[in-house]
Amino acid sequence: MLLARRFAARFAPRFAPALTVCLLLLLAAGGCSRDIHVFRSTTNSPKNIAVVSTTTGETLWSINVPAGQQLRLDFGRGEGDEVQRSPDVPAKTMRWDLYTLDAVAEWGQKMKGGKRLDGDKVDLPDQETIISMSIREADGAQSR
């Protein structure tokens, strides 16, 4: 116990400013979330992804993600930090990109490595949406 007190008394003043800065950065970055989603489709778990309007129930966009690829969806709400962070503002656009499975989503959800295979930007109506995911039957799987 005595050793812990000595350690704290000796090193706490040195690390306090750095810890304060780190905590402030974390608090400031906490609201910088982007509406980005990544779905990996494998031979054992091939995915179907759809963007559905919660207002009408209509499927606005869908894709069968080929096995061995992954889909990245990036929803845009408009300009400005407050608009981007607000869950109350429906997405106005969606950028979709297909990548090989060796691409890795890094902090901030940017894809690193791998190869971009396809993609486009889609305009969305001014409606709230949800993402619907289903898993297809794996190729070569036997029905029961």
Image: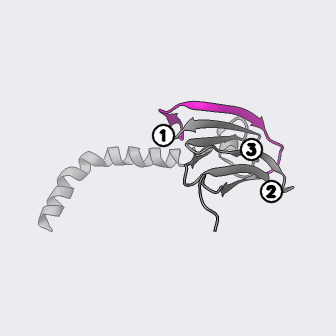
Q: Point out the stretch of residues depicted in magenta.
A: 106-128
Which is in the foreground here, disc 2 or disc 1? 1
> Which residue in the structure is indicated by mark 3?
91
Residue 128 at x, y = what percent?
A: 78, 52
Going from N to C along the chain, the mark reached first, 1 or 3, is 3
- Look at label 2 and name its amino acid: Thr
Residue found at x 52% / y 44%: 29
Magenta highlight on residue 124:
yes
Asked whether the residues under the numbered discs 2 and 1 touch, taking CB atoms below 8 Å apart as contact, a structural biologist would say no
Going from N to C along the chain, the mark reached first, 2 or 1, is 2
Cα gap from disc 1 to disc 3, whole angstroms: 25 Å
Residue found at x 75% / y 48%: 89
Residue 106 at x, y = what percent?
A: 48, 40
Which is in the foreground here, disc 1 or disc 3? 1
Cα gap from disc 2 to disc 3, whole angstroms: 12 Å
Residue 82 at x, y = what percent?
A: 67, 43
Q: Nearer the viewer, residue 88 or 50?
A: 50
> Which residue in the structure is indicated by mark 2?
54
Q: Secondary structure at mark 1?
A: strand
Q: Quadrant of residue 100?
A: top right
Disc number placed over residue 104 in the picture, else none: 1
Residue 105 at x, y = what percent?
A: 50, 41
Callout 3 crowding tier (Cα within 10 Å): few <14, some 14–19, many ≥20: many
Q: Is residue 88 shown left or right of residue 56? A: left
Question: If the image is split into quadrants, where does the N terminus sit?
Answer: bottom left
Which is in the foreground here, disc 2 or disc 3? 2
- Look at label 1 and name its amino acid: Val
Asked whether the residues under the numbered discs 2 and 3 touch, taking CB atoms below 8 Å apart as contact, a structural biologist would say no
